[in-house]
Amino acid sequence: MPFNRPTLTDLRSQCKSYLLTQLKKVGALLRFSNLGIIGDVVAGMSHLHFGYLDWIAKQSNPYTATDEYLAAWAALKDIYRKAATAATGKTITLTGTAGSVIPAGTLLNRSDGYQYTVNAELTIGSAGNITGAVTAVLPDTSTDSTGGGEDGNADAGTVLTLNVAIDGVDTTATATAAITGGADIEDEEVFRSRMLLAYQEPPQGGSDADYKEWALAVPGVTRAWVTPRLLGAGTVGVYFMMDPDGATTNDNSFPSGTDGYATKETQYSGQVATGDQLTVADYIYSERPVTATVYVASPIKTAINFEISGIATATSTTKSALQTAISNILFDDGEPGGTIYLTDIIAAIAAVDNTAGFLMTSPTENIVMATGGLPVLGSVTYA
């Protein structure tokens, strides 16, 4: 039977009633009477105790535990919260006079102030340039509670500037390939989901759930799907996404890199993955059964276009809400090679205000994705 926690008002009333029934000839308790104040104090302390007991109850099970207590429940299943991860760029090009030296640890600044350090000492070659690797400098968690790892990712072509000038070295450097791999501290609810998966799906030495757990253990990975025998007998395909915090659409969540195998995979050494895919592949390689060959891939972005009639005069607010509803369905129900049911999309649109009388003219059947395909919202045409 559920327990209804009394409110502070209820407790104050109960205390005053108890005082009146237990003390003879006390009369009415005036607003600022000593006995009335004592009753309010007792009620306040009782309310505090009820609150503490409520908090204890929440920490006593993994479904509602928070903070260090959630971490303790997760540790029982060898699941740990993912820390912020610094982004890395392997091909940063610097130019200058041949023979000039860039010391290891040299700071480079992005236009928004985010910083990177040069991984190893570099010397400008005879052609007047040198390519090296950099690692993002994570901000202090006291100033950025997210850990700031995701902010360190940058597109190819990003210009970086020397923090302190170096003789013979030009002040600007260029990322000739994307700077990737940065991830924020794992969101608490995402962490809880991974922990509950571990409780619900005990390790089985290489089941689908095992591969999913291994992929989700990599910083930045928020969703993962497993496809047995993707490339034939003995192979396992793992697709994954890297959703920004609060993401509800697939648009900006695709990994950055190329699909392939782990660095130590000798059978397919010519198809080593790069970027985010390599990070996941290398982690799973150390966990998977020795007989399995794991191929790690980004889902294929597949735009789905919609045509809707009957509400051509709908306001921009209604149209925006409608498109958000469709995007949410594609995000929640989409998976590589999966199926999006038309009835779910129609129900989501119908739930949006001021869409009565709409008719979806395209698509007219369930949306079946090709192997590896993951749906994103394309165009929405109103007729």
Image: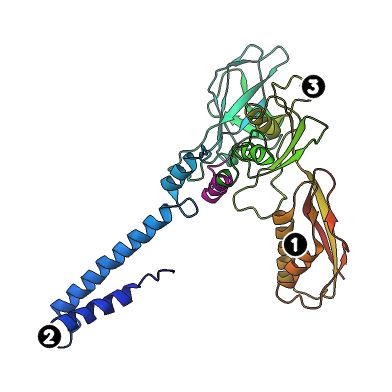
Label 3: element kind: helix
Residue in the image at 66% along x and 26% along y: 90
Earlier sequence position, callout 1 versus callout 3 = 3
* Mark 2, other Cα within 10 Å: few <14 / some 14–19 / many ≥20: few
The residue that disc 2 covers is 26
Considering the whole magenta stretch, tell me its main secondary structure: helix
Amino acid type of the residue tagged 1 in the rendering: Ile
Amino acid type of the residue tagged 3 in the rendering: Gly
x and y percentages locating residue 63 in the rendered image: 50, 53
Question: Quick one: 70 or 275, which is closer to the camera?
Answer: 70
> Was residue 79 drawn as part of the magenta stretch in this picture?
no
Label 2: element kind: loop
Note whether residue 53 is visible: yes
Q: Is residue 121 left or right of residue 248?
A: left
**Magenta residues, as a range?**
182-197
Q: CA distance from mark 1 to mark 3?
A: 40 Å
Question: Quick one: 62 or 346, which is closer to the camera?
Answer: 62
**What's the mark number on residue 326?**
1
Amino acid type of the residue tagged 2 in the rendering: Val
Earlier sequence position, callout 1 versus callout 2 = 2
The residue that disc 3 covers is 270
Question: Which of the 4 quarters of the picture holds residue 167?
Answer: top right
Label 1: element kind: helix
* Mark 3, other Cα within 10 Å: few <14 / some 14–19 / many ≥20: few
Q: CA distance from mark 2 to mark 3?
A: 92 Å
> Was residue 183 drawn as part of the magenta stretch in this picture?
yes
